[in-house]
Image: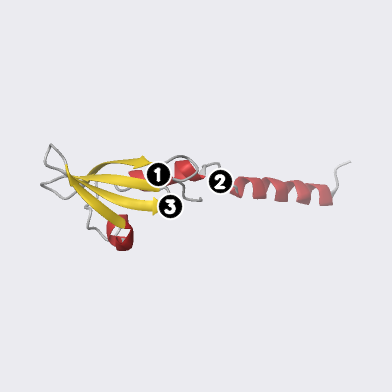
């Protein structure tokens, strides 16, 4: 027999499980980094501007663009490629792994 208490408990269980994110911390990290593609590197929304103490080396690429290093964590380096003419971030990659390159959802 289904009681009111059982219905309430099942409803709470469904509600709580729906609030749990199915995104892993590494997938969340990649989503955050991909968000930068298409924005100017000096935009306030860019991590390069918001967290200047995490900005590292700059490298000139053979195509004339720049790569700017950003330290996401202790063992996670992110490199953003910035277009030489527009200052827009056009690509990124990271050096690290799923355990070191992560942002908790």
Residue where numbered disc 3 is placed: 74
Q: Determine which residue is flagged by label 2.
A: 21
The x and y percentages for residue 31 are 40, 44
Q: Can you see residue 27?
A: yes
Report whether residue 37 is seen: no
- Check the image and name the residue furthest to the top: 62
Q: Assign the N terminus to one quadrant of the image.
A: top right
- Disc 1 and disc 2 in contact, CB within 8 angstroms: no
Q: Residue under circle 1?
A: 31
Disc 2, SS: loop
Would you say 74 lies left or right of 69 here? Answer: right
The span from disc 1 to disc 2 (Cα, nearest Å) is 14 Å
- The answer to which of marks 1 and 3 sits earlier in the sequence is 1
Query: Please, is residue 46 above or below residue 33 in the view?
Result: below
Q: Do the residues labelled 1 and 3 touch (CB within 8 Å)?
A: no
Name the residue located 55 percent from the left edge and 41 percent from the top edge: 22
In the rendered structure, the answer to whether residue 1 lies left or right of residue 28 reads right
- In depth, the one of 85 and 80 nearer the eye is 80
Mark-to-mark CA distance, 3 and 2:
25 Å
54 relative to 22 in the view: left or right: left
Q: Position of residue 99 (x, y in %)?
A: 50, 43
Q: Which of marks 3 and 2 is nearer the N terminus?
A: 2
Instruction: Identify the residue shown where x is 19% and y is 46%.
Output: 59
User: Disc 3 or disc 2, which is closer to the eye?
Assistant: 3
Q: How far is the residue under mark 1 from the one under mark 3?
A: 19 Å
Q: Nearer the viewer, mark 1 or mark 3?
A: 3
Crowding around mark 2 (Cα neighbors within 10 Å: few <14, some 14 to 19, many 20+) is: few
Instruction: Please say if 27 is above or below 51.
Output: above
Secondary structure at badge 3 equals loop
Please state the horizontal and vertical placement of residue 84, each as a whole percent of the image.
12, 46
């Amino acid at each position: 027999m289904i009681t009111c208490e059982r219905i309430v408990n099942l409803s709470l269980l469904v509600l709580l499980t729906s609030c749990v994110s199915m995104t892993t911390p590494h997938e969340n990290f990649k989503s955050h980094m991909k968000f930068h593609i298409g924005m100017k590197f000096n935009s306030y929304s860019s991590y390069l501007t918001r967290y200047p103490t995490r900005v590292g080396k700059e490298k000139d690429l053979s195509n004339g663009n720049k790569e700017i290093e950003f330290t996401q964590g202790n063992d996670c380096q992110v490199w953003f490629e910035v277009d030489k003419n527009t200052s827009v971030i056009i690509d990124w990659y990271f050096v690290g792994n799923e355990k070191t390159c992560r942002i908790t959802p």
